[in-house]
Amino acid sequence: MFTLVQAAGWPIWLLIIASLVAVALITERALFLRRKKIVPPQLLDEVVQELKQKGVSQQMLTRLSEGSPLGMVFAAGLKNIKSAPEVMKESIEEAGRSATHQLEKFLTTIGTIASISPLLGLFGTVVGMIEIFGSQNAGGAAPAELAHGISVALYNTAFGLIVAIPSMISYRHFRAQVDSLTIEMEQQAIKLVEVVHGERK
């Protein structure tokens, strides 16, 4: 591995740093953006049942807020349970924006890494080409210097693509996942408002 890094030259370190950041963020998002964690499947039924049996309590609101992003949205709506449906929906929308922001955390960074990695690879390629032309002299290019310049150019191009492709796939996947979870949270929140105000059983 160290031999490969040496052959690729100093520009490869920028790509190595980018790849380490990408792996860390992709792992973190993969663990965080689990459907059961964001939108617990039985949460709406549990909230409605508890609401009918005990009503809204501070303990219930705290538990919901700390449990999941969907719970946080429910808690925001239930705080205004005695208000008009419009007020309840507004508070849910505000909490929903905050929850969506949580879900989108680090996605911009992953997308940025996916975009700049090929450019960093291209930068390494340019550095390699400069070394190739810089090795030219009156007697021609020294084979060792020429080979080093070519390896710098090719390794950086290849590694730039190796970093960019999984990062872009992960970014697109997480983006779609966040959109799906956001829509599901909205639908569940609307159901809760309708149940609370007697529009749905």
Image: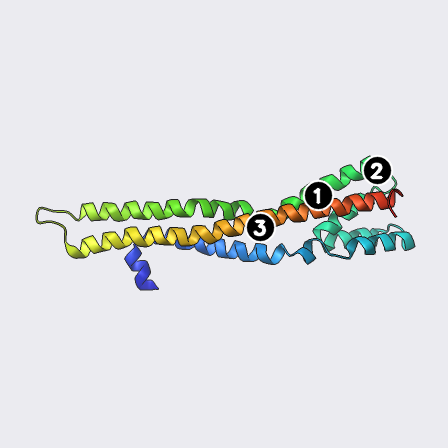
Q: Nearer the viewer, residue 161 or 6?
A: 161
Q: Nearer the viewer, residue 25 or 30?
A: 30
Give the image location of residue 4, x and y in percent.
Answer: 32, 61
**Earlier along the polypeptide chain: callout 3 or callout 2?**
2
Name the residue carrying label 1.
96
Question: Can the viewer see residue 102?
Answer: no
Going by the numbered disc 1, the residue's amino acid type is: Gly
Left/right placement of residue 151 relative to residue 49 reads left
Q: Answer yes or no: do the residues labelled 3 and 2 have beta carbons within 8 Å?
A: no
Gap between marks 3 and 2 measured at Cα: 32 Å
- Which quadrant of the structure image shows residue 49? bottom right
Sequence-wise, the earlier of marks 1 and 3 is 1
Marked residue nearer the N-terminal end (1 or 2): 2
Which amino acid type is marked by label 3? Phe
Characterize the local packing of mark 2: few (<14), some (14-19) or many (20 or more) Cα atoms within 10 angstroms. Answer: some
Say whether residue 146 is left or right of residue 152. Answer: left
Q: In this view, does 126 lie to the left or right of 60?
A: left
Looking at the rendered structure, the kind of residue marked 2 is Pro
* Quadrant containing the N terminus in the rendered view: bottom left
At 24% from the left edge and 52% from the top edge, which residue is drawn? 149
Q: Which residue is drawn at 89% across and 51% down?
A: 55
Q: Is residue 31 visible?
A: yes
Tag 1–tag 2 contact (CB < 8 Å): no
Count of numbered tags? 3
Alpha carbons under labels 1 and 3: distance apart: 18 Å
> At numbered mark 3, what does the secondary structure look like: helix, strand or loop?
helix
Residue holding disc 3: 174
Q: Name the residue under label 2.
A: 85
